[in-house]
Amino acid sequence: MGDRDGTAVARHVASEYVDRLERRDWAGVEALLADDVVYELPQTRERIRGRAAFLRFNIEYPGDWHLRLRRVVADGRFAALWLDVHVGAEQQDACVWLELTGDGLISRVTDYWPEPYDPPPGRAHLVERW
Amino acid sequence: MGDRDGTAVARHVASEYVDRLERRDWAGVEALLADDVVYELPQTRERIRGRAAFLRFNIEYPGDWHLRLRRVVADGRFAALWLDVHVGAEQQDACVWLELTGDGLISRVTDYWPEPYDPPPGRAHLVERW
């Protein structure tokens, strides 16, 4: 697959990944994943290996979670997803890095779930808050 | 600029952005930025407007910080940067979203600085830790 085709596939797969998760279309999510997909959460140093465990992780994930795609950036066999996530009344952004096989299956997912924190001192003269 | 050229420019600008910051090449960083660049830190709800303030923010940023590019994903006028950041003995990953003008200048930077946290209970049967 050329870079251009690869990018189009990655962009499509990345969007479908979010859409099918949001719809709890588990068979559809499964169809996007390589059998030996690796899922990593660097903030907690957690790793999940394999499609079955990854699906179970998502199926069992607690709370009424909803995903909205803010941006997808795709480049060859890589994609980055910027998500707006709601769990009940809570809102959080997420950053997700995808890596695809040459066949367009997701082989690696790396999730970041950045949490709010207070600004450090010393820069209030440069910033506005919202 | 076509999408393909745009992507090549975005990929180059994104890499240069990290490289010039790392080298404290402030004139070089300035040359990559639109005059009215907007920099946002959603975790602290901080916003900085304009090239001058954004440069000052980086110049004044405390600590012996170093940036290593783990991945750049570029797509048209967008790019996503996955960074490995060291400040003294501390290590942290960062996720950065860039938006470029049609002229290839950075018009928007959104930084996420995800911090470590403990895994929630109930999923230890699915994960390994590292």
Image (cartoon, coloured by chain):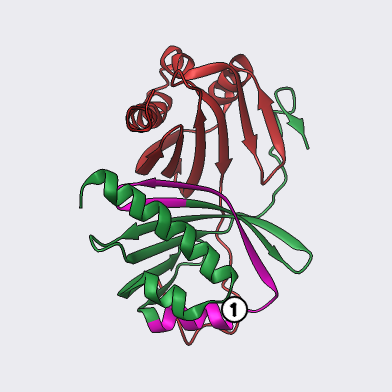
Chain colours: A green, B red
Q: What residue type is labelled 1?
A: Tyr
Quadrant assignment, res B42: top right
**Which residue is depicted at the point 58% across and 37% down?**
B110
Q: Mark 1 points at which residue?
A: A61
Work out whether B52 lies above or below B68.
above
Query: Is the C terminus of chain A in the top left, top right, bottom left or bottom right quadrant?
Result: top right
**Residue B97 part of the magenta-drawn span:** no
Q: Position of residue B46 (x, y in %)?
A: 70, 36
**Which residue is depicted at the point 49% across and 46% down?**
B94
Classify residue A49 as left or right of residue A85: left
Q: Position of residue A88 (x, y in %)?
A: 76, 69
Tell me, yes or no, if residue B54 can be seen here: yes
Tell me, yes or no, if residue B128 can be seen here: no
**Residue A69 part of the magenta-drawn span:** yes
Query: Which residues fall within the magenta stretch?
Result: A52-80
Quadrant assignment, res A53: bottom left
Crowding near pointer 1: few (<14 within 10 Å), some, many (20+)?
few
**Which residue is depicted at the point 42% across and 66% down?**
A40
Q: In the rendered structure, the residue with mark 1 lies on which chain? A: A
Work out whether B35 lies above or below B81.
above
